Image (cartoon, rainbow, N blue to C red):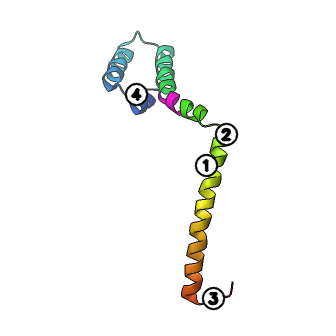
Amino acid sequence: MFAYLDAFSENKEEVAALKEHYEKGGLGDTTIKNILNTTLQNLLEPIRQKREALKLTDVKEILYEGSLKAKKIAQSKIEQVRQAIGINYF
């Protein structure tokens, strides 16, 4: 659990203090798990908010517009390749 707290907690001093307290005794696994859960929930909250802000229709629209841009670029590159290798009959 402390490996995850080391990786995801912003407060490294608090994690060090928790480790020390845990090693001395008096701090149970459940408490550490709850702290880890809170840390991870706080880390994921902005991601959840952004996901909720982007409605599915917005995502589909973004993907569609991106695919149109990519198609234009790809067509241009294909034309360049055809000219470079001499197959201009399409």
Q: Is mark 3 on a helix, strand or loop?
A: loop
**Is there CB contact under 8 Å for labels 3 and 4?**
no
> What percent of the width, then of the height, locates residue 55?
64, 37
Q: Residue 9 carries which label?
A: 4
How many marks the image carries: the answer is: 4
Quadrant in the picture for residue 75: bottom right
**Membership of 44 in magenta stretch:** yes
Q: Distance between the residues labelled 1 and 4?
A: 33 Å
Of mark 2 and mark 3, the one earlier in the sequence is 2
Residue with the mark numbered 2: 56
Identify the residue at the far left of this view.
13
Question: Residue 30 in the image: x percent, y percent?
Answer: 51, 15
Quadrant of the drawing holding the C terminus: bottom right
Q: Using the image, tell me which numbered label, if any, was put on residue 62.
A: 1
Camera-side residue of 32 and 88: 88
Determine whether 59 is above or below 35 in the image: below
Quadrant hosting residue 6: top left
Q: In terms of image quadrants, where is residue 66?
A: bottom right
Q: What residue type is labelled 3?
A: Ile
Q: Of the residues under marks 3 and 4, which one precedes in the sequence?
A: 4
Q: How crowded is mark 2: few (under 14 residues within 10 Å), some or many (20 or more)?
A: few
Mark 2–mark 1 distance (CA, rounded to whole Å): 10 Å
Determine whether, in the image, residue 25 is placed left or right of residue 90: left
